[in-house]
Image (cartoon, grey):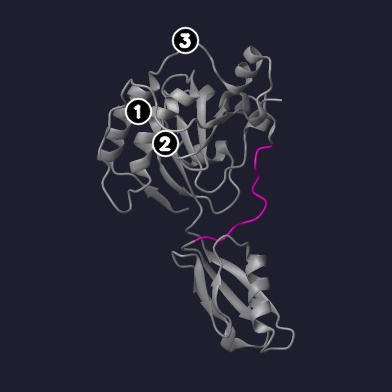
Amino acid sequence: MPVKRISAFTLVVFLVACTSCSMIGNKQDVSGKENAASSGQENPAENEKTPKITEFILGSGDIVDVSVYRRDELSKTLRIDYSGKVMYPLVGDIQAGGLSIFELRDKITQGLSPYIIDPQVSIAITAIHSQKIMVLGEVTSPGFFQADEPMTIVEAISRAGGFTIDGKKKSVLVIRGGLKSPQLIKVNVDDILSGKDQGQNIALLKDDIIYVPRTTISNISLFFSRLSGIISPLLQLETGYFIGQQIDEGPGKGGSPSVSSPGAK
């Protein structure tokens, strides 16, 4: 399984900065469940079903083989470009990014129909480069990982070499939906591993970020306001350098992320 490693210098600076982040206040637990209890109202985010991976969605960099029954000249290997498009004979440019292989097959079939009677099109994925997740913090081998099949939180942490001795299994954070308006999900991996709450072992989605802290996270939103400034440069490692940033103790900036707990009922 292809793994994108982060340089030793990057990790040293990152982990030093995140140590400061991990020390954010432990005065009270403000997880979604306890917030609901203190306010007397239910947290809508807790009642939403966790998204599941139902089928593979194509993205930039993925490679597919397209074949048409009894039309060898139309058998092509296509790489989805950075705009999410592929160019196929007789059909032209097709927006393939964001489609399943079945939706792409239907688009090609429709495009060929004016030229071929009842075209029989089949598509196979030969390489995946678009589906990535990130595992950071107190794991043995933090970095980027290809999510070329449905993967759970426990499986992702296992691919990253498992927890270090300092990793807090009860406060694993999943960051979903990007850094600008993320959904934050706090997961108790101890409960998953003990069999107490397997429902927290949610299926990961493309671009999910898993962070294993050194200390228990008591205030998720405050924690994230410090952490996001460090994660952001790491997402651009392919094109630039990571300059370590200390997390200040001032109030967080930007909008408030949504917080949910996958095990809440």
Q: Residue at the spot x=52%, y=42% of the render?
A: 177
The circle drawn on residue 18 is 1
- 113 and 62: which is toward the camera: 113
Asked if residue 158 can be seen in this view, the reply is no
Q: Amino acid at mark 2?
A: Leu
Q: Mark 3 falls on what kind of element?
A: loop
For disc 2, the marked residue is: 136
Q: Residue at the spot x=32%, y=30% of the render?
A: 15
Look at the image and give the residue range highlighted in magenta.
49-59
- 15 and 219: which is toward the camera: 219
Q: Amino acid at mark 3?
A: Lys
Query: In this rendering, is residue 217 above or below 7?
Result: above
Query: In this rendering, is residue 90 above or below 227?
Result: below
Q: Measuring from the top left, give residue 116's x and y in whole percent.
A: 69, 88
Q: Amino acid at mark 1?
A: Cys
Query: In this rendering, is residue 98 above or below 69?
Result: above
Does label 1 or label 3 sit earlier along the sequence? Answer: 1
Q: Mark 2 falls on what kind of element?
A: strand
Q: Is residue 52 magenta?
A: yes
Residues at marks 3 and 2 touching, judged by CB atoms closer than 8 Å: no
Q: Residue furthest top?
A: 27
In the rendered image, which quarter is residue 45 located in? top right
Q: Measuring from the top left, give residue 57's x and y in whole percent.
A: 59, 58
Dot in front, 1 or 3: 3
Principal secondary structure, stretch drawn in magenta? loop
Q: Residue at the spot x=51%, y=32% of the render?
A: 257
10 Å neighbourhood of mark 2: few (<14), some, or many (≥20)?
many
The circle drawn on residue 27 is 3
- 1 and 212: which is toward the camera: 212
Residues at marks 2 and 1 touching, judged by CB atoms closer than 8 Å: yes
Q: Is residue 215 magenta?
A: no
Does label 3 or label 2 sit earlier along the sequence? Answer: 3
